[in-house]
Amino acid sequence: DAKTTQPNSMESNEEEPVHLPCNHSTISGTDYIHWYRQLPSQGPEYVIHGLTSNVNNRMASLAIAEDRKSSTLILHRATLRDAAVYYCPLINAGGTSYGKLTFGQGTILTVHP
Amino acid sequence: GAVVSQHPSRVICKSGTSVKIECRSLDFQATTMFWYRQFPKQSLMLMATSNEGSKATYEQGVEKDKFLINHASLTLSTLTVTSAHPEDSSFYICSASSDDYYEQYFGPGTRLTVT
């Protein structure tokens, strides 16, 4: 299974943009890049996913490098509610690992008022 | 997004007893459900994958006789921790997906404490 690496922690101020990086240098051609976030004692919440092209939704934007070996989750205006642990697991869309999510250690995002 | 529930949200049991955790997809049919375990300040670790009507596939190092998984319908999967011990104390989380694997929906988790 392809592994992902992320910075242990990041900080931001409220109302400012946040760029959360994720490295997935061993990604395969059939792996989708996903982002989830998790609050303490809660299940992960889906944020966004993509394959090759950049993606936008109401929560965030996902920028995927041309070689797909890294991606960046962009929160355009951080709020206090965005403080969470952010994960960037890959979902394999083929082979024996079909559908499996492999979570890395995640990035703890702290948002300052 | 779709809603996945878990019951109970937290449970305390004595060492040696068994505990059953339910995972339900409330508004969609989940062909596949996944069970994760998360220890404090650690990431989620996949325990097993279950497809409706078939036996679960366990990850390496997870004892299938200790963690019994049943996925009898398209909306319900259960995880039974048999003969629980204090080291089984953890946060257990399920996720569910339909035929479209590109979105998995997670339950709120179950906090298990074994005394």
Image: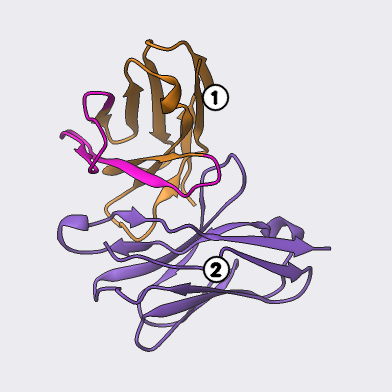
Asked whether residue B66 is drawn in magenta, I would say yes
Q: Residue at left 69%, top 77%?
A: A17
Residue type indicated by callout 1: Arg
The color chain A is rendered in? purple
Measured from the top left, where is residue A34 in percent x and y? 42, 65
Q: Toward which corner of the image does residue B67 lie, by quadrant?
A: top left
Measured from the top left, where is residue B115 in percent x and y? 51, 15
Q: Residue at left 54%, top 40%?
A: B40
Q: Toward which corner of the image does residue B57 lie, by quadrant?
A: top left
User: Magenta residues?
Assistant: B40-68
The circle on residue A7 is 2
Give left or right: position of B56 versus B84: left
Height in image: A8 above or below B29? Answer: below
Q: Residue at left 36%, top 14%?
A: B18
Give left or right: position of A5 versus A93: right
The circle on residue B10 is 1
